[in-house]
Image (cartoon, rainbow, N blue to C red):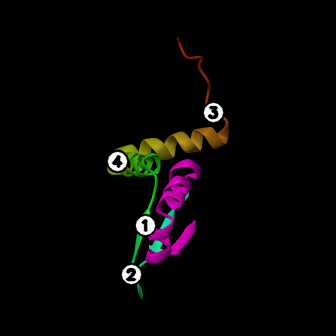
């Protein structure tokens, strides 16, 4: 996780955005006491949205929990993808 001030961010905006995009870093820009902004990559944002959607219903959450339990018990299987 990276942290910077708004002044430093303005000076090196390209460097900071490149780090966020290429290295999947999270950037916190401090804007005063108890005030700030978080910058994440588009891929990270999309991943968070997908996770939120998957956990948005109790039924989906139950299915995911069940799959995790099966995986930990060794009750999972693999399949080859058809190309």
Camera-side mark, 2 or 3 = 2
Q: In the image, 77: left or right of 42?
A: right
Residue reaching furthest bottom? Answer: 33
Total marks drawn? 4
Q: In the image, 62: left or right of 70?
A: left
Tell me how far mark 3 sits from mark 4, CA to CA. Answer: 26 Å
Residue, disc 4: 53
Residue 81, quarter of picture: top right
At mark 1, the secondary structure is strand
Compare marks 2 and 4 and give the one earlier in the sequence.
Answer: 2
Residue 36: x and y in percent read: 40, 76
Is 63 part of what is drawn in magenta? no
Tell me how far mark 2 sits from mark 4, CA to CA. Answer: 28 Å
- Answer whether labels 1 and 2 touch (C-beta < 8 Å): no
What residue range appears in magenta?
1-24
Residue at left 59%, top 51%? 23
Q: Nearer the viewer, residue 35 or 16?
A: 16
Residue, disc 3: 75
Camera-side mark, 3 or 4 = 4
At mark 2, the secondary structure is loop
Q: Residues within 10 Å of mark 4 (few under 14, many from 20)?
A: few
Tell me how far mark 1 sits from mark 2, CA to CA. Answer: 10 Å
Tell me how far mark 2 sits from mark 3, CA to CA. Answer: 47 Å
Q: Residues within 10 Å of mark 1 (few under 14, many from 20)?
A: few
Mark on residue 35?
Answer: 2
Mark on residue 82?
Answer: none
State whether the magenta stretch is mostly helix, strand or loop.
helix
Asked if 65 appears above or below 78 in the picture, the reply is below
């Amino acid at each position: 996780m990276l942290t910077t001030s708004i002044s430093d961010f303005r000076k090196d905006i390209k460097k900071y955005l490149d780090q966020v995009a290429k290295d999947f870093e999270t950037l916190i820009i401090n804007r005063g006491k108890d005030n700030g902004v978080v910058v994440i990559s588009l891929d990270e944002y999309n991943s968070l949205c997908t996770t939120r959607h998957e956990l948005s219903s109790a039924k989906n959450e139950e299915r995911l929990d069940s799959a995790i339990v099966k995986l930990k018990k060794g009750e999972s299987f693999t399949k080859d993808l058809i190309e």
